[in-house]
Image (cartoon, grey):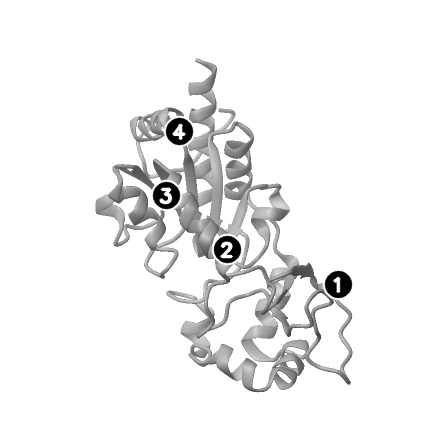
Amino acid sequence: MSEEIPTQSSPQEFENAAQILRDSKHVICLTGAGLSVESGIRPFRGPGGLWTEHGEPPMDGYQRFLRDPASAWRERMQPEGPMKAFSETLLRARPNGAHLALVELEQMEVLRCLITQNVDNLHRAAGQQNVLEIHGNATLLRCIDCLERRPRNAVQIDLDHLPPRCETCGGIIKSDTVEFGEPIPRDVLEACMQQGEQADCCIVAGTSATVYPAAQIPLDVLSRGGHLIEVNLYPTEITQQCVISLRGPAAPTLARLTEDVREHLKA
């Protein structure tokens, strides 16, 4: 390495984690807000969280959308307060070293699938190919009936005819991000569960893994005898169930882990 990467974990812990990744047949990764924070995006909960400061959105947000989708669309097109600040931050955010490290693990054919709870599109922007966004993607729109997704700029929005309708099935279009009270889209949820069933190792990075159904995925891997490797600044509720917990910021920690994996593959 050209420079020392700050971490709270020992070289032996990185070595052991890299060995497990190399020996595993189907590695997946679950990521959360800890990765986005390092790109300048505030988390929703916890210290400095958007909802911690301003209060959580209504727990029946999806039901409100269904009752009056036109009004919901008008609010979305002219956001105010914390959601306006969040949207502006997403536009400025760029992938960090953690995102790039996970792309490299995929390119080395070590990481088979990445499941993220983040909606910021940064994994895709970094070049990740096999990505499942369990809470949706803020850059996409989705038909609530056929689940077809399109980039926001690919859907024409007529303020006099809201909500926009799906060109394929005529269903109502909404943001792809999953609201409170909204079921996880069935196509993504099924794919996530399938990955959890196949995996014999799961990297849990930048998340406390307490929000379901995403939190169920590493538990499913564990229940079949698979390994969990945690990457987080602090201990979490899942720490005791992990074979290795690497402590430190996601970007340098995943970069160091990826370098060790690369060295293992060369050996």
> Which quarter of the picture shows residue 166?
bottom right
Tell us which disc is closer to us: 4 or 1. Answer: 4
Badge 4 density bin: few <14, some 14–19, many ≥20, Cα 10 Å: some
Q: CA distance from mark 2 to mark 3?
A: 14 Å
Location of residue 17 by image quarter: top left
Q: Secondary structure at mark 4?
A: loop
Camera sees residue 80? yes
> Horizontal placement of 260 versus 71: left or right?
left
At mark 2, the secondary structure is helix
Task: Residue type at mark 2: give it.
Answer: Val
Position above or below: 157 against 111 = below
Question: Going 25% across and 37% down the picture, which residue do you hit?
Answer: 225
Dot 3 corresponds to which residue?
A: 197
Q: Position of residue 10 (x, y in %)?
A: 30, 31
Residue in the foreground of this view, choosing between 9 and 120: 120
User: Residue at point 54% right, 46% down?
Assistant: 131
Q: Which residue is mark 2?
A: 188
Element at badge 1? helix
Residue 170's disc number: none
From the viewer's perspective, is the residue at label 2 or at label 1 nearer? 2
Give the structural element (helix, strand or loop) at label 3: helix
Looking at the image, tell me whether mark 2 or mark 3 is earlier in sequence order: 2
Q: Give residue 153's mark.
A: 1
In the image, residue 108 lies at what x, y percent? 52, 27
Q: Amino acid at mark 3?
A: Glu
Measure the alpha-carbon separation of dots 4 and 2.
22 Å
